[in-house]
Image (tube, grey):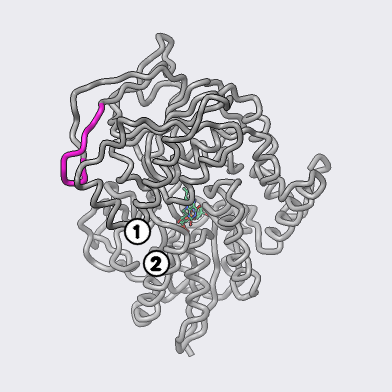
Amino acid sequence: MTKLRLAIVGAGPAGIYAADILLKAERNFEVSIDLFDHLPAPYGLVRYGVAPDHPRIKGIINALRDVLDRGDIRLFGNVRYGTDITLHDLKKHYNAVIFATGAVHDANLPIPGIELEGSYGAARFVSWFDGHPDVPRTWPLEAQSVAVIGNGNVALDVSRMLAKHADDLLPTEIPANVYEGLKASPVTDVHVFGRRGPTSVKFTPLELRELGELNDVDIIVHDEDFDYDDAARAAVASNKQVFVIDKVLNQWRKRETGKASRRLHLHFFARPVEVTDDGNGHVGGFRYERTAPDGHGGVVGTGEIRELPIQAIYRAVGYYGSSLPGVPFDKKRGVIPNREGQVLWKGEPGFESSTASQQMYGVYATGWIKRGPVGLIGHTKSDAMETVRHLINDVGNWWRPEAPDEQSIVDLLEARGVEYTNLHGWHRLDQHELALGAEQGRVRVKVVPRHDMVEVSRANVPAEL
Ligand SMILES: Cc1cc2nc3c(=O)[nH]c(=O)nc-3n(C[C@H](O)[C@H](O)[C@H](O)COP(=O)(O)OP(=O)(O)OC[C@H]3O[C@@H](n4cnc5c(N)ncnc54)[C@H](O)[C@@H]3O)c2cc1C
């Protein structure tokens, strides 16, 4: 019987679902899966993206853990594809690879002043408050007035985390340094800006409604943004989600405000124009152009420029994937070019193209690096089903590795001095974090520095932890 030795790079939901689906799939060959991640902990953005005050979503980790704990997938944490292992290595040891490396970087917002000090990408801030080991441990929270650009759920997460009182976050798994940073924040006003109107937002109703429940935070909306045109009225009438969002926002228009110590302002019909300098190379203000409905669900500029004094700005305008050595990359979309998960290339070296069209045998993609950084965790399951279906059907085109035995990749990592962690190590780290949390009456206290994560996982727990 044929055996598929499969490498999956990326232990986020997409990679774990792909492993699960393959193991459960109807097939006439055996499977052995090695799952690599450059972080010492699995679960990708569920651990390092989903906001800490969303325990229900974080709970998806329990389902992902069940997959890993079944015992038929080997986890190699703290192993970075591109430096610790290469495509050449994978070809030597496996029949195929699925890349499930997601997207962690901020998309660009090309306006003057965006590079000023005090201007941040939402992705890095999210990584900070979720305790990602590769971002600085301190975050400059010195602004009283902050702008957040974007009308999607990440913009809501960032605004909520900035506006919420740190003590209301304490029962969650936020790391100690994040609690301390937020506790000292002088913020009083968070302004969220969207280019289009209230009926065109990408917020989900649940996340939007949550803003209205924040302790000691007023939600401010402006009557001028609710002068709907026919297209907006039609959207409210025909789309349940838009209907609920419109209802929530209209309830806030009637609310009494003025007693809370912090405010979260929602500004619509505002096109970013410029981040202005305070004279010292730091963010001093945000200039935007008022837009108006164009009658077809879009907007046009009105020429009216407004400016708001702020001391920090966060752009939450989307994520962007990273290119991987040896693997084609579509720079425009920030994804690996693929057809239903089968990776495509031009067929020759130097492939950085959006017009790749030949299948690169043995190489597959799933999740955000396949589809782009949109959609919920559940969508990565359908991604994985599609990719795995092709992997199974492509059996005649898999690589023929010269060293397919399971020990040889372990020998390679050890020979290179890679301090890889495994599933037992992750269990140790997980238990350690839960125990730290229990001591303080909290869900969990995350270990943040990579070195400490590796030490705990590899059973060398430093005394101070
Ligand atoms: C701020 C934020 C909040 C979100 N909130 C929600 C929510 O509330 N509900 C919801 O359903 N969805 C939410 N999402 C979306 C959800 O996180 C994604 O749909 C999902 O995580 C995408 O899965 P993925 O496996 O493709 O990528 P990821 O989760 O990013 O996993 C990719 C994995 O690949 C690893 N990796 C990357 N490069 C390498 C490399 N070179 N070598 C080895 N490993 C590598 C990474 O370490 C990571 O573990 C949120 C997303 C963000 C950004």
Residue at label 2?
Answer: 383
Outermost residue toward the top in this view = 279
Describe the element under mark 1 as helix, strand or loop: helix
Relative side of 339 to 403, left or right: left
Relative side of 246 to 348, left or right: right
The question of residue 293 being in magenta is answered with yes
Determine contact: label 2, label 1, CB under 8 Å. yes
Q: Which amino acid does label 2 sit on?
A: Asp
Q: What residue type is labelled 1?
A: Arg
Outermost residue toward the left in this view = 295
Residue at 32 percent of width and 21 percent of height = 287
Q: Residue 449, image x and y in percent? A: 66, 41
Question: Disc 2 to disc 1, how far (Cα)?
Answer: 8 Å
Q: Residue 16, image x and y in percent? A: 52, 66
The question of residue 141 being in magenta is answered with no
User: Which image quarter: residue 64?
Assistant: bottom right
Q: Residue 162, image x and y in percent? A: 54, 32
Residue at 65 percent of width and 40 percent of height = 169
Residue at label 1?
Answer: 371
User: Which image quarter: residue 465?
Assistant: top right
Describe the element under mark 2 as helix, strand or loop: helix
Mark 2 CB lies closer than 8 A to ligand 1: yes
Q: Residue 301, image x and y in percent? A: 19, 30
Local packing at callout 2 (Cα closer than 10 Å; few below 14, some 14-19, many 20+) is many
Q: Which residue is at the front of the view, 74 or 206? A: 206
Q: In the image, which residues are magenta? A: 290-298
Residue at 37 percent of width and 30 percent of height = 222
Q: In this view, does 362 lie above or below 58?
A: below
